[in-house]
């Protein structure tokens, strides 16, 4: 049977399944042919289940479902894996028996499709009852394909329902990889970190992603991530966000903030999806979610105690007026200058962290971050006459983690203290510090606080009866603000203003313009800036963009860039990333990847990865791979090792 299926459906025991349901087969859109295996706890299975509910595929396509229990999972390698209810054992509420085969374990389903399967026994899984095999077990592919696969069987209103509208596809594709990398999977990298260093490396990007998502929601004014239309991004984000306060904060220690307290826009978006869309609410089982994480991760929670809170799981009270969801200034300003007066500290603005000179670390609130940035820029402006790019770097912090950031002198902290008092009297300011009120009032306050060292654009003499267009006035105000408040040199103001008028925030536009001046084209500069916004250092962002330009997938490019800025060669980084994706521990993957530097080809490293996945020791895997490198076949090399 497998020989009649497409080559890219399943390439071997270590590959997942990538089948698609299409009219020209072999998986055709027939009613009552397919069965979906899910776990209600799993955010990735949640994606597929949501599409089944939204498109009513159970009713019109006859897709049936079996649900595994939330725990136990098995040993630290996931064996024997997720279980179904069976008649001989007490049933778990919300789980089901395997409706097709009466199996006890999920791995039995995988072995029916491939007896030699060596991958993870994960959910979701879409099963073909006709060909008696797995169609697909990749959640992102199912999220996309199930939207249209059964349209020939659906009524017109459901055919029209799409989460991937053509006019938004480029934006969806651009943001989907970022969401997957820095939010959907990054919480797991933080939660399953084996060292303090790994944990601290992975937590800040999670909150950088939440910061960016908050900003996108306010920019598009809801109720969905891209505005008026729900898209795949809402499904991807929901599956993680609805679990965030409930389990990721306490269980995965992603506790620099919570959704309900620190992200009013995201919280409002979540309220809408959960309380106003029955499909989202009906596919969310908090008991399964909480019990899965707390009772199946023995190394993280050995006593398997499940917390009662938070309560409610999702707050009520969706606010349709998004201007009311901005966090009050008094609540945002958690960092008080009184705590820091007279002390040096390093501020990592984009990650909301600062480190005092005694080694203690605290949080910087989102609104107060703007005050610190402004104070820092004014300090440098006074020190260097016009703050030219050659004398100071304006834009964002470099680095991710605690070791890099902006050293804030005492004079800046004193300046920030006064600014905070002034800024707290302003009303209607959003997370980025923009004011909806009279700009002239805000400017006069700025003039009162700091002498104006930047020349304004030359005033235009108006002839009798002549009026300046509104666009020209707005342009003049923008140029004035950029030079006076943001410290942009006169020669750069026009270019930065062009970027602001294209929709970029002031600090992002300044950064993009600086990158363009250093030799990057616009697209490259925007991509680098996006990566910096996601919490990566400037060096990592530039390296990742260059790798993407060479044809590397964005996720692989970023992973390689993180290694290369630490001194690894491109070849070693490539092999290290490949080994990590096969489940090899990071330190060991790095060590093996460095064999590329001593002349070992990529194929040798791939053989080592396969052997490690087959329970060979590192030494055995390297010896066998060396034999294949010398021309011996893999089977012969394995036999030689046994001898």
Image: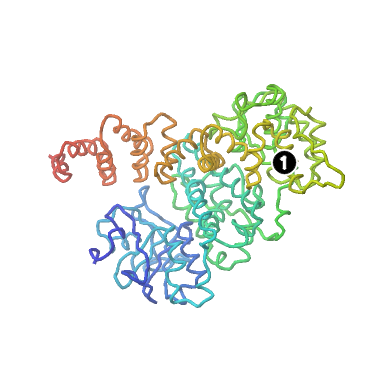
For the question of whether residue 312 can be seen, the reply is no
For the question of whether residue 568 can be seen, the reply is yes
The relative height of residue 231 versus residue 547 in the rendered view (above or below) is: below
The residue lying toward the viewer, choosing from 331 and 407, is 407
The relative height of residue 475 versus residue 226 in the rendered view (above or below) is: above
Image quadrant for the N terminus? bottom left
- Residue 199 at x, y = what percent? 49, 38
- Residue 467 at x, y = what percent? 82, 47
- Residue 311 at x, y = what percent? 63, 56
Image quadrant for the C terminus? top left
The residue to which callout 1 is attached is: 478
Q: Within 10 Å of the Cα at label 1, are there few (<14), some (14-19), or many (20+) other Cα atoms?
A: many
Q: Residue at 51% x, 62% y: name it.
A: 166
State which quadrant residue 640 falls in. Answer: top left
SS of the residue at dot 1?
Answer: helix
Query: On the picture, is 282 further left or further right than 272?
Result: left
The residue lying toward the viewer, choosing from 75 and 475, is 475
| Number of numbered tags placed on the structure image | 1
- Residue 469 at x, y = what percent? 77, 48
Q: Residue at 38% x, 57% y: name it.
A: 122
The residue lying toward the viewer, choosing from 279 and 165, is 165
State which quadrant residue 134 falls in. Answer: bottom left
The colour scheme used here is rainbow
Query: On the picture, is 378 further left or further right than 238?
Result: right
């Amino acid at each position: 049977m497998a020989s009649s299926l497409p080559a890219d459906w399943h390439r071997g025991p270590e590959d997942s399944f990538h089948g698609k349901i299409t009219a020209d087969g072999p998986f055709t859109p027939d009613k009552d042919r397919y069965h979906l295996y899910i776990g209600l706890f799993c955010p990735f299975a949640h994606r597929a289940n949501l599409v089944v509910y939204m498109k009513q595929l159970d009713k019109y396509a006859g897709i049936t479902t079996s649900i595994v229990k939330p725990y136990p999972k098995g040993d630290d390698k996931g064996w024997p894996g997720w279980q179904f209810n069976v008649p001989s054992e007490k049933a778990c509420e919300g789980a089901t028996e395997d409706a097709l085969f009466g199996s006890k374990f999920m791995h039995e389903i995988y072995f029916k499709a491939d007896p030699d399967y060596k991958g993870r026994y994960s959910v979701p899984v879409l099963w073909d009852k006709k060909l008696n095999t797995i169609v697909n077990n990749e959640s992102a592919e199912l999220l996309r394909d199930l939207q249209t696969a059964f349209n020939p069987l659906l009524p017109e209103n459901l055919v029209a329902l799409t989460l991937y509208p053509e006019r938004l596809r480029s934006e969806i594709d651009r943001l989907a990889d970022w969401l997957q990398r820095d939010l959907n999977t990054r919480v797991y990298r933080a939660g399953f970190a084996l060292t303090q260093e790994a944990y601290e490396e992975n937590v800040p990007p999670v909150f950088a992603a939440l910061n960016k998502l908050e900003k996108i929601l306010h920019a598009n004014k809801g109720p969905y991530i891209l505005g008026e239309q729900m898209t795949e991004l809402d499904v991807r984000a929901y599956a993680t966000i609805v679990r965030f306060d409930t389990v990721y904060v306490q269980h995965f220690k992603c506790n620099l903030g919570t959704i309900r307290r620190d992200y009013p826009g995201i919280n409002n978006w979540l309220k809408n999806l959960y309380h106003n869309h029955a499909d989202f609410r009906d596919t969310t089982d908090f008991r399964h979610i909480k019990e899965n994480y707390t009772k199946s991760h023995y190394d993280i929670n050995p006593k398997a105690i499940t917390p009662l809170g938070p309560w409610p799981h999702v707050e009520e009270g969706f606010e349709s007026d998004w201007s009311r969801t901005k966090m009050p200034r008094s609540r945002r300003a958690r960092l008080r200058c009184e705590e820091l007066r007279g002390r040096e500290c390093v501020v990592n603005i984009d990650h909301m962290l600062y480190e005092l000179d005694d080694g203690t670390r605290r949080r910087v609130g989102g609104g107060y971050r703007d005050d610190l940035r402004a104070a820092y820029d004014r300090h440098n402006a006074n020190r260097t006459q016009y703050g030219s790019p050659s004398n100071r770097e304006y834009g964002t912090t470099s680095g991710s983690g605690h070791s890099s950031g902006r050293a804030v002198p005492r004079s800046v902290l004193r300046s920030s203290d006064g600014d905070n008092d002034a800024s707290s009297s302003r009303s209607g300011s959003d997370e980025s510090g923009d004011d909806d009120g009279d700009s002239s009032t805000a400017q006069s306050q700025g003039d009162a606080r700091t002498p104006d060292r930047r020349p304004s654009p030359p005033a235009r003499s108006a002839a009798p009866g002549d009026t300046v267009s509104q666009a020209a006035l707005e342009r003049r105000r923008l140029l004035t603000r950029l030079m006076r408040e943001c410290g942009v040199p006169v020669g750069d103001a026009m270019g930065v203003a062009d970027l602001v008028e294209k929709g970029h925030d002031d600090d992002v536009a300044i950064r993009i313009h600086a990158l363009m001046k250093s030799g990057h084209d616009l697209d490259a500069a925007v991509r680098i800036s996006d990566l910096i916004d996601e919490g990566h250092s400037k060096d990592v962002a530039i390296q990742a963009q260059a790798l993407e330009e060479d044809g590397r997938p964005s996720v692989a490019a970023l992973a390689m860039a993180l290694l290369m800025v630490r001194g690894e060669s491109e070849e070693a980084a490539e092999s290290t990333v490949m080994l990590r994706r096969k489940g090899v521990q990071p330190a060991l993957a790095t060590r093996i990847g460095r064999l590329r530097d001593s002349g070992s080809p990529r194929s040798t490293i791939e053989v080592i990865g396969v052997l490690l996945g087959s329970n060979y020791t590192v030494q055995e895997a390297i010896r066998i791979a060396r034999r294949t490198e010398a021309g011996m076949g893999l089977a012969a090399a394995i036999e030689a090792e046994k001898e």
